Image (spheres, helix red, strand yellow):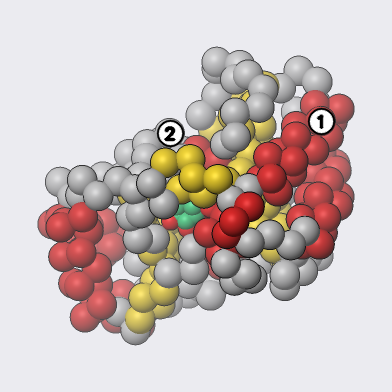
Amino acid sequence: MNKQELAQLTNEVIKLSREIGNWMKQQTTHESTAEIKTENNLVTFVDKESERRFVEGLRNLLPQAGFVAEEGTGEKIEGGLNWVIDPLDGTTNFVHGVPVWCTSIGLTDGNEPILGVIFDPNSDEMFSASKGNGAFMNDSPIKVSTIATLSSSLLATGFPYDDFGREEQYLRLFQSLMHRTRGMRRLGSAALDMAWTACGRFEGFYEYGLNPWDVAAGCIIVTEAGGKSTEFNNGSNPIYGLDLNCTNGLVHEELREIIEQYFS
Ligand code: IPD
Ligand code: CA
Ligand code: CA
């Protein structure tokens, strides 16, 4: 796909995300309607129905692509084009009525993300990017922040909620960063953490135990906004690597060195 075709496809994914995201916002749900997938891991009718709608719409847009979708719809095409879908990122917030959640749609070619759309229906913010075409919030181009030191940075992270195997290391890292930054935030949506890094609200975001659908769209949006996404150890496959260091690029190495002291 050339740049122009990718840009056109991005516009179609934007339309689909707006339509489905606004439908999701109209759905009211509460804890009694949520099912528990694994400990502390919830899923609702809205996760499943929005995924069904996304898969149907995306299949029409690009019939040759496969799917890596959180709720299990569709088949992956190994090494080919795949839609990587988190229909509702921030389900725990959604279930508790906290208006911090989004839709997140990535398109990958092999392991490389080439298109991403993250829609926050609560603030009506549409983040999008495709390879070589830049990153946008609604119709405006976005760039990562120009802050170059952790001491002036606001960072985001996610707390482990079902994989407590690295809890001690995680808490020590968190404590260290608490002392070395302007502040730490935990929104409860990895995709929004990345989108907010892309538009300069956060200097960086890190978390372990993530899945491809949490980060695929965010990776291309951050890259096209001038930032950087790697695994904790700087590995170049953050989508399938399960841990993520995602920054404005300028604080990347400083954050990596501190992470390395706890996760080596
Ligand atoms: C979760 C959110 C959360 C992060 C978790 C994710 P979900 O996604 O992104 O911020 O800490 O690791 O699993 O389950 O709400 O789609
Ligand atoms: Ca998610
Ligand atoms: Ca989800």
- Residue at 20% over, 45% down: 165
Q: Which mark is residue 186?
A: none
Residue 56's disc is 1
Which circle, 1 or 2, is nearer the viewer? 1
Q: Residue at x 35, y 81 (%)?
A: 183
Where is residue 237 drawn, in percent x and y? 41, 36
Crowd tier of the residue under label 1, counting other residues whose Cα lies within 10 Å: few below 14, some 14–19, many 20 or above: some
75, above or below 106, in the image: above
Q: Position of residue 173 (x, y in %)?
A: 20, 64
Q: Residue 23 or 27: which is nearer the viewer?
A: 27
Does residue 197 appear to the left or right of 61 in the view shown?
Answer: left
Q: Is residue 256 above or below residue 250?
A: above
Marks 1 and 2, the one that precedes in the sequence: 1
Specify the quadrant of the image occupied by residue 56. Answer: top right
Of the numbered discs in the image, which one, if any, rests on residue 240?
2
Residue 139 picture quarter: bottom right
Residue sitting at x 37%, y 40% = 242
Name the foreground residue: 155 vs 136. Answer: 155
Whether disc 2's CB lies below 8 Å from ligand 2 is answered: no
Q: Residues within 10 Å of mark 2 (few under 14, many from 20)?
A: some
